[in-house]
Image (cartoon, grey):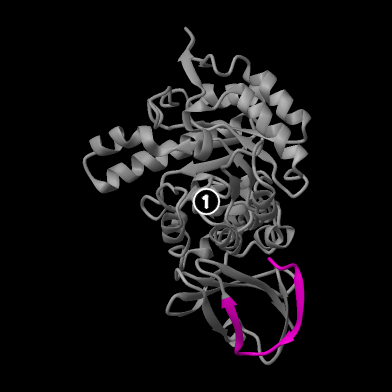
């Protein structure tokens, strides 16, 4: 073989390897399991401050949430100030020194996240990143930021002006690619969260623009109806999720007071089966022991964080009862038995639907109890708007 042909062959093999490399390789090793942490918006909205972030970081450590896997402390909208004469983004008076705040969060063994928009303005009307993507990415890196939530809100003016759906889609995709490239150019690994509400089936292209997670829905709120509407409609998109890139049905409302304990267990269980990011949205500094127990259930967290990285899906439904299952790395499966009715219901679970033959062994993840050997149909009473969550194996 001539030297030229050998060189050509090596180039071809390299190109083939690059083409077959999964999108996860673009993630710089971040978000290999769904990100876990906390975000300021659900509870604090516009009232987030430097002092709030420090208090939440302290509480995340003191409560044991950090040790349970929660890592990110994420500042949502309203931190932004004006730009200086050179166009560099400044913080407003609520955040006098973002680098010092990042250093404080890092000193707790945690990571700091921030928020921006590809438009000129954010959802709340603060300064966005349009035309300043590289500057902002360099600023975030210099501050020590570890996570960026990039919210479509402010770009909608440009998308409407594009004139057609195809042109608007291109405006959106180009904007996310531009910030992806800007973040990568800094050399600092940052989780890149696309917050664009599932527009244009983002799960089909989110990984290709560098997203580590992408919102699949509109905003959640602290009601069972909204949580259930979001969670139980995440059907059929699990193929797009995996290590480094995740479907995101929005943040957790656990502990904000609008649902019952059983409803919050449903919320936590369903998000875990969906391999969703677990971003608490309550006030960690004042949460009850009951809330903490839900958020730090290590059996349920282990389902969400399973290294196989498979998103679960619905495998059966009978009236108000839905059965969801998620395959796990050790060959077992997480099975969620959900009751969407306002009164207790008896579920009749056929484990054959989850791929098992004959009797199975199971552990109840909320009762923290091994059930031994059980057979189909497994009859169990599920509380109103509640869940029975099992880990099942043979």
Q: Is residue 374 magenta?
A: yes
**Location of residue 313 with respect to 250 vertically, above or below:** below
* Rendering coords of residue 191 (x, y %): 61, 40
Residue that extends furthest to the bottom in the rendered view of this protein: 358
Residue 124 is left or right of residue 390, and the answer is: left
* Rendering coords of residue 124 (x, y %): 40, 29
Q: Nearer the viewer, residue 79 or 190?
A: 79
Residue at figure coordinates x 57%, y 23% from the top left: 49
Which segment did they paint magenta? 366-381
Residue that extends furthest to the top in the rendered view of this protein: 85
Q: Nearer the viewer, residue 211 or 78?
A: 78
Q: Quadrant of the N terminus?
A: bottom right
**Location of residue 232 with respect to 40 vertically, above or below:** below
Residue bearing the label numbered 1: 207
Is any atom of residue 331 visible in this view? yes
Q: Quadrant of the C terminus?
A: bottom right
- The image quarter containing residue 55 is top right
Residue at figure coordinates x 60%, y 85% from the top left: 379
Main secondary structure type of the part rendered in magenta:
strand
**Location of residue 90 with respect to 237 vertically, above or below:** above
* Rendering coords of residue 149 (x, y %): 52, 37
Is any atom of residue 180 visible in this view? no
* Rendering coords of residue 75 (x, y %): 57, 31
Q: Nearer the viewer, residue 385 or 390?
A: 385
């Amino acid at each position: 073989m001539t030297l030229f042909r050998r060189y050509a062959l090596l180039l071809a093999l390299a190109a083939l390897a690059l083409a077959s490399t999964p999108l996860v390789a673009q993630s710089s090793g971040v978000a290999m399991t769904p990100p876990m942490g906390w975000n300021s918006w659900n509870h604090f909205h516009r009232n987030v401050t430097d002092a709030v972030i420090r208090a939440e970081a302290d509480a995340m450590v003191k409560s044991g949430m950090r040790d349970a896997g929660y890592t990110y402390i994420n500042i949502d909208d309203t931190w932004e100030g004006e730009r200086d004469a050179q166009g560099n983004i400044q913080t407003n008076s609520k955040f006098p020194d973002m680098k010092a705040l990042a250093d404080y969060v890092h000193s707790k063994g945690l990571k700091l996240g921030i928020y921006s928009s590809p438009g000129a303005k954010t959802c709340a009307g603060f300064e966005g990143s349009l035309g300043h993507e590289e500057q902002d990415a360099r600023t975030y890196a210099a501050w020590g930021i570890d996570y960026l939530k990039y919210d479509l809100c402010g770009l909608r003016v440009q998308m409407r002006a594009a004139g057609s759906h195809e042109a608007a889609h291109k405006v959106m995709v180009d904007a996310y690619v531009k910030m992806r490239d800007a973040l990568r150019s800094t050399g600092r690994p940052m989780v890149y969260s696309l917050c664009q509400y599932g527009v244009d089936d983002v799960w089909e292209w989110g990984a290709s623009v560098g997203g580590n997670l992408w919102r699949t829905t509109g905003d959640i709120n602290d009601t069972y109806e909204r949580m259930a509407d979001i969670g139980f409609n995440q059907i059929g998109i699990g193929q797009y999720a995996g290590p480094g890139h995740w479907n995101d049905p929005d943040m957790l409302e656990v502990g904000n007071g609008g649902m019952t304990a059983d409803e919050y267990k449903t919320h936590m269980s369903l998000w875990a089966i969906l391999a969703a990011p677990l971003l608490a949205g309550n006030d960690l500094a004042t949460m009850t022991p009951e809330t903490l127990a839900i958020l730090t259930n290590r059996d349920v967290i282990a389902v969400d964080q399973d290294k196989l990285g498979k998103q679960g899906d619905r495998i059966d439904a009978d009236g108000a009862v839905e059965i969801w299952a998620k395959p796990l790395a050790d060959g077992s499966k997480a099975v969620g038995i959900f009751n969407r009715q306002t009164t207790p219901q008896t579920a009749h679970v056929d484990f054959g639907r989850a791929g098992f033959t004959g009797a199975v062994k199971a552990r109840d993840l909320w009762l923290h109890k091994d059930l031994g050997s059980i057979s189909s149909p497994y009859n169990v009473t599920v509380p109103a708007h509640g869940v029975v969550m099992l880990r099942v194996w043979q």
